[in-house]
Amino acid sequence: ADVLRNFTDEKENFKQNLKNDVKGLLRLYGAAYYGINGEEILDEALEFARTHLEPISRLDSPLGTQVKHSLKWPILKGLPIRESKHFMSNPSTSKTRPTMKSF
């Protein structure tokens, strides 16, 4: 949780430039689930990320689809096999991930 303090300003609010970094927001959203109930900074991180990701999830694009999926099924709440299948079939990640060959 202390690592997240690097993303806050002197008033302990999340830095506003984070709201324009979709991948960073997705990571922040996922990381917030690693905490324990009552860790205030993690609760704030979750709310900050969710607030800025929800409008993107309504876009009709691969990014919108990925964000919508991430909001519905954060990595820790998803089943590993289902998450792997989603990642492998997601066209927005196809250029950045290794491919698997069928034998």
Image (tube, grey):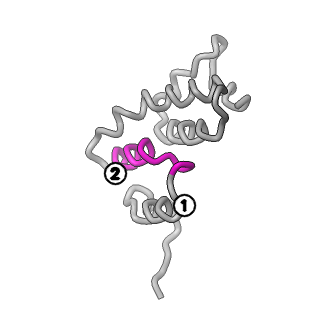
Picture mark count: 2
Q: In which quarter of the image is residue 32?
A: top right
* 65 left or right, relative to 87: left
Counting other residues with Cα less than 10 Å from the Cα at mark 1, is it few (<14), some (14-19), or many (20 or more)?
Answer: few
Judge whether 29 appears above or below 78 on screen.
above
Q: In which quarter of the image is the N terminus?
A: top right
Residue 66: % across, % down: 40, 49
Over which residues does the magenta segment extend?
62-77
Q: In which quarter of the image is residue 91?
A: bottom left
Residue depicted at x 45% and y 32%: 50
Which secondary structure, mark 1? helix
The residue that mark 1 highlights is: 80
The residue that mark 2 highlights is: 62
Judge whether 32 appears above or below 12 on screen.
below
* 43 left or right, relative to 19: right
Residue 81: % across, % down: 51, 65
Residue 41: % across, % down: 64, 25
Residue 49: % across, % down: 49, 31
Q: Distance between the residues labelled 1 and 2?
A: 21 Å
In the foreground, 75 or 103: 75
